[in-house]
Image (tube, grey):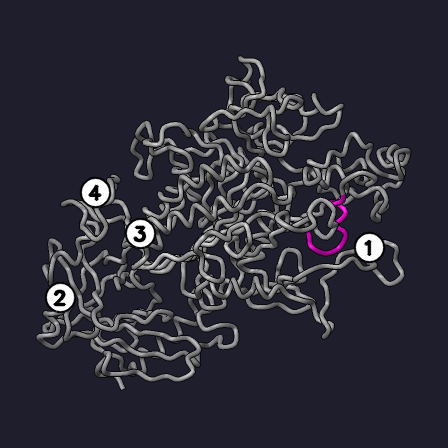
Amino acid sequence: MLLGACLDRPVGNVDPVTTNVFTARISRAGVDRIDLLFMIDNSSSMSDKQLILETAVPDLVDRLVNPICIDPDGGQHPAAPPGELCPADQHREFLPVTDINVAVISSSLGDAGANIACSGGDTVDGGRLLGSLSRAAGVSTNPSGFITWREDTDPQRFKRDFQALVRAVGESGCGWEASLEAWYRFLIDPVPYAAFDKVPCSPGARAMCTSPRLGSDNQPLLDETLLAQRAAFLRPDSLVAIIMLSDENDCSLRATGQSWIAGTFGNGVAPMYAASSACAADPNSACCYACPSGPPAGCEWADTPCQESAEHLEDRLPPLSDGTNLRCFDQKRRFGVDFLYPTERYVNALSRPRLCPSNPTLDSDDCPGGSVDNPLFAGGRAAKSVYLAGIVGVPWQTIAASTDQEGAALPDDVLRFKTAAEFGRADWDRILGDPNASPPRLPAEPLMRESTLPRAGVVTGGPNGREYATDASLAGLAEDLQYACIFRLPEPRECKDETPQTCDCTPTLNDQPLCEAEPGVTSPTTVQHWAKAYPGLRELEVLQGYGDNSIVASICARNVRDLSRRDFGYRPAIASIVERLEEQLVRRCLPRPLEVKADGSVPCKLVEVQPNAETCSCDPSIARVKPARLVEQSVRQQLVSGEGKPCGADDPQCQRACLCEVEQIVAEPALSACRNEDNPASAEGWCYVADSDDQHIGKPSFVDECPSTERRVLRFVGQGIRKGALTVISCSGRSFAQEP
């Protein structure tokens, strides 16, 4: 355990009074547990991206379990062999992570109860783990459906299982990708309903709404299988990283109400309802409404679009204006109603300790049905330990950094994406605009504007190849959007004997940039040369709202041909994810020296906290003693006032938490053993080790993984800190042994 939380201020040589105490909750030696959740889009057109992700899996595993070496200037170097030190003047990027859960889910949640286009089988995975589904039967997962990395794991088998899970995702899922709702449902949703039924929206009404299916006790049935999988996967003290991979905008249809209408599709199904004229100018206007619902108070009834659409199947759009591939595109403007969950829902899910399941935004401030604990934080996890990454439809050119984080020029084979801290207002305006403004402000980058028509300002030969006529081969039916970006396939693909669901350049659909060796230069053929991605605007909106713990990356790879380069495939995305996690993974080396007293001790106390312990016993045989009154008071106060709810909502004052001080080793020969022996058999507790210009205490190799300016650690030997416990450090200018 290596701690530095209280050391940004000097410790030692302070007035010896009982009020001179500084207390902070700290992590163990960086992070020793990671729960990685991959949400992978499994609609058609995703197989090429899944293949590229599959090749990036070994990079992610290697980077976490065998970190690269860093020189004093921040330069990156290849990792040393596992278990060995980096070369002289270099140190590991962070300590190897030895406890990782990896789970994969798909984007396929169905069609909101319409049960027409997506009614079951491989088209609806319901947020459950891929490893528990039949198409992943050959993957060596645990019974819950995820894979684990532990110290004794065979690395090659782990990578093979990881890659096999990615392959098992497939591309036969529901075409309305619930990329955001899928990870929320598995990881966070307090009430993941098992099924929905159509019932009258109100007593005696003809209109039908979806509602959770009830059990014999008249209570909604929950997906107990999913809840069990979540309980097995998600540890209360882990770092959590959610990684989304999708080439389309999110289509998280609301699970209740009339959102099922958006999922209707097929012969004999009427087109969608038309929208009022106000929607065309400002979808966020109070007078934007669906024609059959009539205008809200204060808005005009005599509405030309609604009158015109009345001539076409009772206030519905003309059939040629309602392509089924566009059902989630610009819904409010086109239909007068938004069937999707608000993106605020997912920002709140990642950041709020309590949620309101009955509120679409989850905002608990005004919750008629009562709010509940957020499962993500129920065990005391701090919000800063949850990360969200999106590998989505955005040109890599628009989010690429021009230098490394130290300001130095990047090598030719390195592509680095800007961090959340580097994203300014102009960056977000470029790729996202402001969808909540009235009227919405479109992205400044034309490529990021969703449109069925060619967009002004897009040049041929740019990141999306070229604009094209989306209706050219579809008898006037606009069935597609313009692309945000395209990228070369590792190998061209012949489509003449395939279907549009499996290949983009079939003989009747090949007049587009994907089917040209050089878009705008060569003629289209039935050979697909490029893969596509559409603007991932809703995912980006959540990433912007979530803030510093977001990672934005492009699904359009810069290089898919040269495996030896660092910009190959999704390596830049993986690098961005790992480097953002580094804040939590990095070894806790001390930035400042501690005062060492004559007896060899330092003026700090370390307290192990076990929240909601059934019994509380501090065992002296493993260097645990009851803390002094002043220390205990200070620690409990820090737990209550610090980030998150470490003791749970049912113990907000942490009165049931068991506190045991971990004794500092001061007596010989145990102190020398702690400071100098690799595996001291007789020592129990902790000691201070330093090897810097001003202090040489203990074995220098114990701080070899620290940067040259921070070669100081608090070293634990013997029992160490028990997993599941929190640790709080309390420092003062005097020994607390004098306190009652």
- Report the span colored magenta: 254-264
Amino acid type, residue under disc 4 in the picture:
Asp
In the drawing, does residue 510 fall left or right of residue 653?
right
The residue to which callout 4 is attached is 71
Q: Earlier in the sequence, mark 4 or mark 3?
A: 3
In the drawing, does residue 160 fall left or right of residue 432?
left
Which-is-in-front pick, marks 4 and 3?
Answer: 3
* 263 falls in the magenta region: yes
Amino acid type, residue under disc 1 in the picture:
Met
The residue to which callout 2 is attached is 675
Amino acid type, residue under disc 3 in the picture:
Val
Which residue is pictured at 58% across the width and 17% down the height?
Answer: 524
Q: Earlier in the sequence, mark 4 or mark 1?
A: 4
Quadrant where the N terminus sits is bottom left
The residue to which callout 3 is attached is 65
Q: Earlier in the sequence, mark 1 or mark 3?
A: 3
Pointer 1 local density, CA inside 10 Å: few below 14, some 14–19, many at least 20: some
In the structure shown, which secondary structural element does the residue marked by tag 1 occupy? strand
Place of residue 72 in the rendered image (x, y in percent of width and height, measured from the top left):
20, 43
Q: Calculate the distance from the C-alpha at mark 4 to the C-alpha at mark 1.
A: 64 Å
The residue to which callout 1 is attached is 208
Contact flag, marks 4 and 2 (Cβ < 8 Å)? no
Q: Calculate the distance from the C-alpha at mark 4 to the C-alpha at mark 3.
A: 19 Å
Q: Calculate the distance from the C-alpha at mark 1 to the C-alpha at mark 3.
A: 52 Å
Which-is-in-front pick, marks 2 and 1?
Answer: 1
In the drawing, does residue 364 fall left or right of residue 382?
right
Place of residue 135 in the rendered image (x, y in percent of width and height, measured from the top left):
54, 50
Q: Earlier in the sequence, mark 2 or mark 3?
A: 3
Q: Calculate the distance from the C-alpha at mark 2 to the C-alpha at mark 3.
A: 26 Å
